[in-house]
Image (spheres, rainbow, N blue to C red):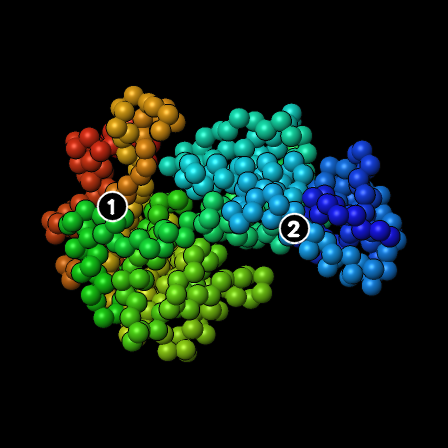
Amino acid sequence: MKFEPGLSKLLPIELIKKYQVIPLAEEGQALIIGMEAPFDLQAVDDLCLLTGKVVIPRQMTREEIAVALKRFILDSHSVIGETVGEKYDPIQYDPNNQVGRLIDTILLKAVREGASDVHFEPEEQGWRVRFRIDGILVELVRPQLENYAGIISRLKILAGLDISKKRDPLEGRFQQNISGKKYDFRLVTMPSLYGEKAVLRVLYKETVGFTLDKLGFSADNLEKVTGLLAHPQGLILVTGPTGSGKTTTLYAILQKLLTPEKSITTLEDPIEYTLPGVTQIAINQDEGLSYVECLKSLLRQDPDIIMIGEIRDRETARIALRAALTGHTVLATLHTTSAPQAISRLLDLEVEPFLIKSGLVGVVSQRLIRVKCHCNQGCPSCNFTSYSGRTSIQEALEITPDLKRHINSNFAEHSFILAAERAGYQSLIAMGKGLCDKGITDRVELARVIYCP
């Protein structure tokens, strides 16, 4: 079959390679393709979804496809060169149809507005896209494109996922070059009442360059955290709800501790960013790579510093504390609302009090809170929210010998807090109120982020 120049505009190269098909002609709403197995109905149905066209398969031999594929790649390169020259940007030029162009536009807008997540949500009538900006979901103008299934399939292909699996939760990653910078995206799909919902986490590589002094820590808390890191061994917990910046703080701590003399290994689920000089291990429960199993093996690999993405159960907590007692620095996250509550949480997991007293060095709890915009009443630069950007509020707690006396089977959190306050502990609420008094944020935002009586 004859391969006509210019057909490279009809299908993106990833689909060509995945399905081993060649676009042969376009006739109105019909797309004629060449493929070795024209009776592969699954592949034909997938391409119908992704292109929004009626796909008509034609028989081609494997050799014909291989020859055509070489010409296709050359043709696609020439089309790109003619269209945008050396300044090619996949956001400005997309060889795919409306689906690809819409996704590129959404990703460009997400990056420009600093969104942390992009939600693709099916509804009874149509679908919508929402960005999470500064911790708040903001709805975009609803796209007119009706091919929502094609949107999800396109995202899955980018993330290397099986588009035929529509009833299973799936996770994947991909990288996109946007306006000259590379961005990582983590995709999670989930079946729902009206179709698959997809959420993209936008991973900004420049975030990895953050140091502790640039994360909004107060001078007093920064000094306390630095003091915790000076301990030659022990467990340091970073607590807070999802989206409170715990991972960013842990990465900043790792970069502070990173030296050529130290062996640092992280256990993460999933790996958010790549850290040069650090061994990073992705937890995968389906393949037997749980936190517990990885920790047991890791301790036989002579690490100096271990980061645990999250302590979820008693065994992980006990192994982490025992590692802290045997000469290791262990960093981990825990879901609690305050630093003192971390003690209660460990006890709830049935960790022995003597292990906590012996192994726990300190706890850092934090939240991300929106900062007042210079306009004070709403303007285009803050999307008329009166807030622009976020900073963190934190509380840092060192487990001193005096505080250890309160950690027992009859632990009373209120008494522990009073003792901590006598030693200089300042709560999240106290720091938040201080930011309000300075005009950096306000009581409405503080009440949204944390209960504030």
Residue at the image point whose x is 28% and y is 34% from the top: 371
Is disc 2 in contact with disc 1, using a CB cutoff of under 8 Å? no
Q: Is residue 211 left or right of residue 37?
A: left
Q: Which residue is mark 1?
A: 216
What is the x, y in percent for residue 50?
70, 42
What numbered label is drawn on residue 265? none
Q: Which residue is mark 2?
A: 78
Residue 307 appears in the figure: yes
Q: Quadrant of residue 137?
A: top left
Residue at the image point whose x is 46% and y is 65% from the top: 281
Helix, strand or loop at disc 2?
helix
Which residue type carries mark 1?
Gly
Residue at the image point whose x is 41% and y is 78% from the top: 300
Helix, strand or loop at disc 1?
loop
Residue at the image point whose x is 62% and y is 45% from the top: 82
Which residue type carries mark 2?
Ser
Residue 411 appears in the figure: no
